Amino acid sequence: MFVRTYGCNLHCTWCDTAYTWADTDNKAAQTESGIKYDRNEPVYGLKEMHPITVLNELCAIWPIRTRPTLIVISGGEPMLQQTQLAPLLEQLDMYGNQMHIETAGTLSPNLGFDKYVTQYNVSPKLQHSGNPGTLRYRPRVLKDLNGTGKARFKFVARAKSDLDEVRRIVKEIEIDSSNVMIMPEGTTAENNAQVARDIANAALHEGWGISMRLHVLLWPNDKDM
């Protein structure tokens, strides 16, 4: 199950969830689509929800109190809302659920948040994301996350040449190769498969895994995914 938070401190040009942050003309101009989203749009816009409300919404979909499952907190950037999310994670943990946090790795976890997290799915953004290096690459934060022993790293690659940047990061942060996944970028199934074919052998040679964008392959252009 997924909980998606609103707002992000990075603005990737190819972001497929730009509706969580591209709500001004300036932000929209930073995306490849140039689409400005309405933050008050009732389906995909900003909704302020109490943790208990979120918990009840999840319970309406799946009996998480009696049949624990995996719940992924995504975004946007959920680490911006650690204090607000901690009470929700506490409730989910109490019922035995596992919580994965998807993050770009620019914000370190605080103790009150970290103790409820099962796994961090860390996706440091590369140069092709369009974000300034000082914003997208925070070595100290990545080392903090790696140091929790709960981090798995996923790098979005557009071309084989992007793997050189991944190698530098993996070496500097001292990430075990078994904890590295490469996700081929692509907003269509055709593009995703083509990038995967271009980079797969080089990534596997490094001992890294390949993670396809299944939501793009199965449900193209569906924001509900």
Image: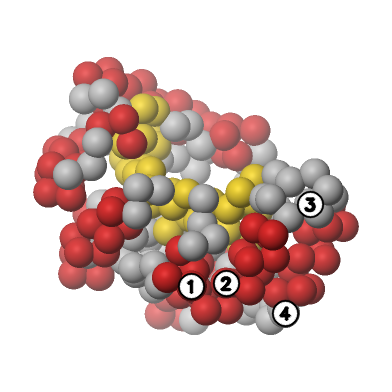
| Marking on residue 86 | 2
Mark 3 or mark 4, which is nearer the start of the sequence? Answer: 4
Q: Which residue is mark 3?
A: 64
Q: Is residue 163 above or below residue 11?
A: above
Q: Amino acid at mark 1?
A: Gly
Q: Which residue is mark 1?
A: 112
Residue 31 is at least partly visible in this image = yes
Q: Are circles 1 and 3 on residues that touch, CB within 8 Å?
A: no
Residue placed furthest toward the right? 60
Q: Quick one: SS at disc 1? A: helix
Q: Disc 3 and disc 2: Cα gap in Å? A: 17 Å
Q: Are circles 2 and 1 on residues that touch, CB within 8 Å?
A: yes
Q: Disc 4 and disc 2: Cα gap in Å? A: 12 Å
Mark 1 or mark 4, which is nearer the start of the sequence? Answer: 4
The count of marks equals 4
Give the foreground label among 2 and 1: 1
Mark 2 or mark 4, which is nearer the start of the sequence? Answer: 4
Percent of width and height locating residue 34: 46, 66
Q: Amino acid at mark 3?
A: Ile
Q: Which residue is mark 4?
A: 50
Give the foreground label among 4 and 1: 1
Label 1: few (<14), some or many (≥20) within 10 Å?
Answer: some
